[in-house]
Image: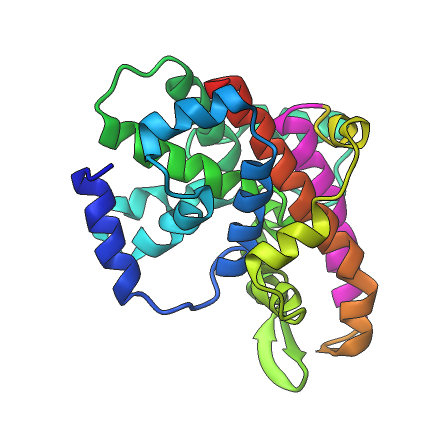
Amino acid sequence: MKTKLLIAFTLFMQMITTEVMAWGTTGHRIVAEIAERNLTKKAKKNLRKVLGYQSLAYYANYPDFVKSDPRFKDNDSWHYINLTANLSEEACFEQLEQSTDKNLYKRALVLIEELKNSQEPIEAQQEKLFYIIHILGDAHQPLHVGRPEDLGGNKVKVEWFGQPTNIHAVWDGKLVDYEKYSYTEYATVLNILSKKEIKNLQNGNLKHWLYESHVLANEIYQDAETRDDLRYEYHYKYKQMIENQMLKAGLRLAKILNNIYG
């Protein structure tokens, strides 16, 4: 499908470097690839009407890549939601509902509803779909459900194998990239569950999933208070958590896309 938006994005992708973004470029592609492998036949068919035969992973980082374009500046806050520390589930849900309309939670709900009932030109549908693919991944990176006072961990300074960075960046890309898998290899490694296990992980809705991330963020923050030089042991400790989050993100993105297009 050769629309103006897809052509422009293709050219932009050729110029961009693979700097670490939210979940990193690899992490977002892993999430999108897992989602694509768990789509229904009907959803795949209907998605082709919007995207052609290109993979979901190809567009998974679009919302990060366009951040430098002033036209998309107002969308920066769609990638995260900041919450008070150590909330109960009920208090978390209350903060989500009372939050501004321009955050990950509220915008995801709007985009999903608009895509369900969309009669818009194909370019507008594509752009909304790119954001859903991306921000469902962000919802499962715990520090995208972080705290406002440190910008989701961006102000929490640490070292990664002796190199200065921050805890947010470690979780965005460094833990994933440490494995040295391609995104398709990592998706294959993670996408091994039975139908029953997949259904269990897909239970709930976006509020429940964000609360899960909030609980994990609390653990990450607490651990970061005790050390600042992160090496092999840190990777070993959090390997399963980060892999579980990418897997959940992919399966839950598939659930949403199947609901919209299937």
**Magenta stretch bounds:** 204-226
Would you say 178 lies left or right of 138 here?
right
Q: 46 above or below 123?
A: above
Q: 239 above or below 106?
A: below
Most extreme residue toward the bottom, as rendered?
162
Tell me residue 81's x, y (percent): 54, 41
Whether residue 82 is visible: no
Image quadrant in which the N terminus is located: top left
Whether residue 43 is visible: yes
31 vs 136, nearest the viewer: 31
Residue depicted at x 38% and y 19%: 114
Quarter where residue 238 is shown? bottom right
Residue depicted at x 62% and y 30%: 95
Most extreme residue toward the left, as rendered?
4
Secondary structure character of the magenta stretch overall: helix
Residue depicted at x 37% and y 38%: 53
201 vs 186, nearest the viewer: 186
Would you say 30 lies left or right of 113 here?
right
180 vs 211, nearest the viewer: 180
Residue depicted at x 51% and y 55%: 22
Tell me residue 210's x, y (percent): 65, 36
Q: What colouring style does the render use? A: rainbow
Q: 66 above or below 257?
A: below
Would you say 154 lies left or right of 130 here?
right
Quarter where residue 97 is shown? top right
Tell me residue 67's x, y (percent): 32, 53
> What number of labels is visible?
0
Tell me residue 116's x, y (percent): 42, 16
**Residue 82 belongs to the span the image colors magenta:** no
